[in-house]
Amino acid sequence: MRQAAAKVGGGRKGGLGRWGRKGTLVAAFSLMAYGGQGAEAAGQACSFDVGTAHRVKQVLPPGTGATRWDGPSNMVEFQGQLYFSLVRQNGPPSLWRSDGTEPGTFAIQEFPMPPAGSLAQLTPTADQLFFVAAEPSHGRELWVSDGTAAGTYLFADLTPGVEDSSLNLLAGLGPRLVFIRNQAGGSQLWAAQGTSSALEPLVNLGTSVEEYPGEPIRLGDSVLFFFRSAQGNTLWRTDGTAGGTVALGLLDRGPGSARMQEVRVSGEAAFFTLIEPDGATEIWRTDGTPAGTVRLHTLGGEHRVSRLLGRIGASLYVVGTDTRNQRMSLFQLSAEVPGGREPVMMLPNPYAAQPDAFPYFIGVTDSGGRLFFLTGIGSPGPAPRTTQLWVTDGTQAGTTLLLEPVSNSDESVPFVQSVADNLVMLLVYSGGPSAWVTDGTVPGTRPVAYVGAEGKPSDPGPYTRVGEELFFSARDGSGYYQLWSVPLVSACTRQEP
């Protein structure tokens, strides 16, 4: 493995472990998680690092008959504690909570074994934890918990009897929950709060023609979501009330319309891309209003594949691969007005003259005003020739190769995730899939230390921050995925007025 400061160029201003152990209407593939959590105290400048990882609890003891992919999933923070589902293929799923200690990590409620039982989509509101679970007498329905066994119960049987309800895109907005319910006659946006008597449909969306995996898009105190019908793609916004639910616009028309690809949220705006039938990439901006939802750019699809990285200041940054010469370049676009594309730099590809050496985008996250992104270079076989971790501040001089290779395994797909203003976690394949951390420098890109007789945590992530602790699932010496955590360590210096 090579770590090199491949700071390319001379300073001209240029201006997403695994594929998913983790469906649903058109939603956002938001790869920017935890951007900007708790970086600075008043009058102080703070930087973060991670401490030593350790196993919190063996939630799957030996002899339980667990399979290779069983383990903690759907992790969320609720009222200062971690909640997660323990998913099992040959055993009953269960709802758990943890305060970060072994005795404080326990199951709240167990559900029937699959296929009759299931547990997913944990979604906190201000004072309730909602989730979707299945059991034989009611099917797949909406449940709620206050963190106790007595306070965990079926919230509403929307489809009475044993039939399932199709509930997707759950999101908490203050004390209210919003979600989309799919039925044979169409889809509706619903809201819930308190008790089932407050459960109500907000708006009829029509009939969707296609479902996508993803998550709702948070923008301020509202949620954005896409709905794809025979008429085209419509962008909606809701604050959890009927009056605050509005269609921001039909983005394109017809059943053969463009397909939503990715969303990046930055401050009070969201940027998203649509892929046209001819391969061109549309870049849109929305501030959550109909007038503020506009198409900024259209990047030609012939011989070029474009992916949106994100925003830095007044600029957007895109990587584009030219299929004719197998080269990937970083470009700058305006985040405010249409038109204009300025090259920042071309990323190196030493295999460009060889067949099937196509550079491709893997994932991105923003942290501390910079974009951390992963790229790969293809090969004739299933595994890539190489994968690279880059960081950019939007300039050629500020674009640095931090790590290569990140993962050359065809079974381990790397990801990046921001966990603090200057700190990014990533999955690196080094003698197996391992937890790494970077502060955006080559010396600061390194493996995460671990302690305990359980052995090295393998295939870790994603990470859920609760206070100053990062929780994650990893396979260890037990042979199963268990609950692990690593502390965030802060160092602050007082700033002179």
Image (cartoon, rainbow, N blue to C red):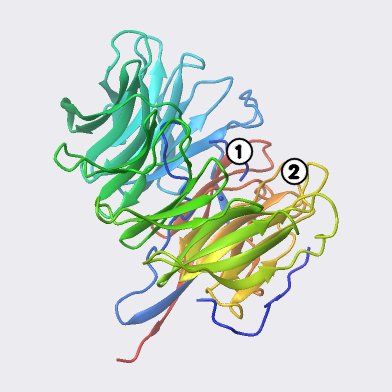
Q: Identify the mark at residue 481; answer none if there is no mark.
A: 1
Q: Is residue 138 visible?
A: yes
From this view, report whether residue 262 is shown above or below residue 180.
below
Q: Is residue 487 visible?
A: no
In the picture, residue 441 is in which quadrant? bottom right
Specify the quadrant that holds the C terminus.
bottom left
Q: Amino acid at mark 2?
A: Asp
Q: Is residue 328 above or below residue 280?
A: below
Q: Earlier in the sequence, mark 1 or mark 2?
A: 2
Residue 291, horizontal then vertical, whole percent: 24, 54
Specify whether 355 is left or right of 174.
Answer: right
* Marks 1 and 2, how far apart at CA: 20 Å
Amino acid bearing label 1: Tyr
Against 41, is 338 above or below?
Answer: above
168 left or right of 387 in image: left
User: Residue 139 falls in which quadrant of the image?
Assistant: top left
Q: Classify mark 2: helix, strand or loop.
A: loop
Q: Residue furthest bottom?
A: 496
Q: Is residue 113 left or right of residue 190?
A: right
Image point (59%, 69%), residue name: 391
Q: Secondary structure at mark 1?
A: strand
| Residue 178 position within the rendered picture, expressed as x and y whole percent measured from the top left | 27, 36
Observer-nearest of 151 and 255: 255
- Per the rendering, the mark at residue 410 is 2
- How crowded pointer 1 is (Cα within 10 Å; few <14, some 14-19, many 20+) is rated as many
Name the spot of residue 491 as percent of width and height, x first: 46, 76
Q: State the residue at coordinates (56%, 67%).
A: 331
